[in-house]
Image (tube, rainbow, N blue to C red):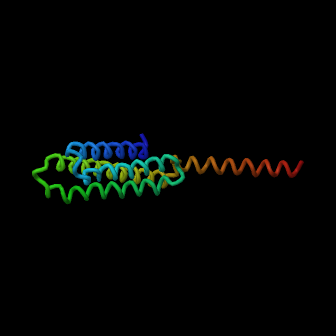
């Protein structure tokens, strides 16, 4: 599974944590929806990355959201010790975001190694297809001008 699909999955999981935490607390604390906001942003980054044109930018933004999603709840996890659902929500959010950031780092390193080795990544394949189409149209234009 490619990293943009993982991004969409992690985004949906964060939305589930946020919405679940909101309703477990009795729909009183709107701050319980913070993981859902991070999840929606991550989901959007995954969808944009799936389009292919801005894959690198979208994945770097998603990784940044993951870093924020890791450190934000981690800093405040022990401020509200008596509220077990808040601690669980913050813990799950931090854990999911840490896993996602580690997966992103691995994916970024693999892409760099593939680029250095001269292998075609998905982005390179799309670029090559565009060059082939341009080459074919140039050849066709020359043939049309000769006839």
Disc tally is 0
| Residue ID at (35%, 49%) | 39
Query: Could you tell me residue 120's position as x and y percent?
Result: 53, 48
Residue at the outermost top position: 1
Quadrant (top left/top right/bottom left/bottom right) for the N terminus: top left
Q: Judge from the rendering whether residue 35 lies leftward or rightward of residue 3; answer left or right.
A: left
Q: Which residue is at the front of the view, 40 or 118?
A: 40
Q: Nearer the viewer, residue 134 or 39?
A: 39
Q: Closer to the camera, 135 or 45?
A: 45
Q: Locate residue 133, reporting x and y percent.
A: 68, 47
Left or right: where 141 falls relative to 132: right
Query: At 61% from the left edge and 49% from the top edge, which residue is drawn?
Result: 128
In percent of width and height, residue 116 lies at 48, 55
Task: From the viewer's perspective, tell me whether residue 135 is left or right of residue 46.
Answer: right
Q: Which residue is at a point 37% across and 51% down the rendered structure image?
A: 104
Q: Residue at x 29, y 50 (%)?
A: 35
Residue situated furthest right in the rendering = 147
The x, y position of residue 21, in whole percent, is 23, 45
Question: Is 101 in front, or is 40?
Answer: 40
């Amino acid at each position: 599974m490619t990293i943009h699909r993982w991004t969409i999955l992690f985004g949906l999981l964060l939305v589930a944590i946020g919405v679940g935490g909101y309703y477990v607390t009795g729909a009183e604390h709107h701050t319980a929806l913070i993981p859902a906001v991070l999840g929606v942003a991550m989901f959007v980054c995954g969808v944009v990355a799936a389009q292919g044109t801005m894959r690198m930018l979208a994945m770097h933004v998603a990784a940044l959201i993951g870093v924020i999603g890791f450190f934000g709840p981690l800093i405040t996890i022990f401020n509200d010790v008596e509220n077990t659902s808040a601690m669980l929500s913050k813990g799950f959010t931090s854990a999911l975001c840490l896993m996602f950031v580690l997966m992103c780092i691995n994916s970024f390193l693999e892409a760099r190694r593939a680029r250095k080795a001269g292998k075609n990544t998905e982005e390179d394949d799309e670029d090559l297809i565009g060059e082939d189409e341009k080459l074919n149209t140039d050849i066709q234009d020359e043939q049309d001008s000769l006839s």
